[in-house]
Image: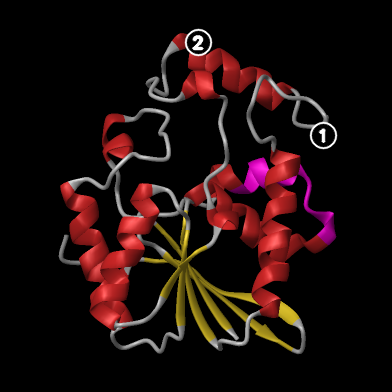
Amino acid sequence: MKLYLVRHGQSIGNVDKIHQHADTPLSELGISQANELAKRFTSIPLDLILTSHFKRAKSTAEIVAKKTEVKIEICELLREIKRPSLLEGKPTMDPEAVEIRAQIRANLHDSLWHHSDEENVHELISRAKDFLDYINTRTEENILAVSHGIFIGAVNGSVIFENLLTPEIYKAMEGSMHLANTGITLLERADNKWRLQTWNDNAHLGNL
């Protein structure tokens, strides 16, 4: 089985550098990126497109689905990490936002700690593993999953480190493994084991 993990196209929130909410739409550039991604997948076999329900991911997936005529399904496991609701709409460099993120980092080791109503990194990693378990139940051979940078990083960490993945290791990966908007990551399963084949392939963006 081949699993193509793709980050959504650029969103308005990416441009404005704010903490986003589920309804943040694609920017004009993000729409163009999604169209280039769709062209790319006209020459890559696909049997199914799964997508996060967040607007920026769903819009990206719908553009690819229209171009490739491949069926699309919502998969709630593909949603982005839930940040504290207090952060939604705030600039990333807002002093209160910076302080909240610092508190979260300081408590990475504690699986029970929450600032408020967010999903902590322990829960994120668990959801990434649940997603891989879910994909293992699918019978399609070529699946595109449109998601978000943080969640895709957690999925890749789960493949590379398996049960050794900790929040500290994940955060170290997150800081050094950038994922571009519509960057393609390919995971392939053989002999009941997932392997990372390609990370952040964005050759389709050469004209943008």
Q: Which residues are magenta?
A: 163-173
- Mark 2–mark 1 distance (CA, rounded to whole Å): 23 Å
Disc 2 designates what residue? 96
Q: Is residue 87 left or right of residue 131?
A: left
Q: Amino acid at mark 1?
A: Ser
State the scheme by which the image is colored. Answer: secondary structure
Looking at the image, residue 179 lies above or below residue 96: below
x, y percent for residue 102:
62, 19
x, y percent for residue 90:
40, 20
The answer to whether the residues at label 2 and label 1 have Cβ atoms under 8 Å apart is no
- Within-10-Å neighbours for mark 1: few <14, some 14–19, many 20+: few
Residue at horizontal 46 percent and vertical 79 percent from the top = 48
Q: Nearer the viewer, residue 126 or 188?
A: 126
x, y percent for residue 68:
29, 82
Q: Is residue 171 magenta?
A: yes
Magenta stretch secondary structure, dominant: helix
Most extreme residue toward the top, as rendered? 95
Disc 1 secondary structure class = loop
Q: Is residue 109 left or right of residue 74?
A: right
Looking at the image, residue 135 lies above or below residue 154: below
Disc 1 designates what residue? 111
Examine the image and state in which quarter residue 195 appears: bottom right
Q: Is residue 45 left or right of residue 15?
A: right
Examine the image and state in which quarter residue 194 appears: bottom right
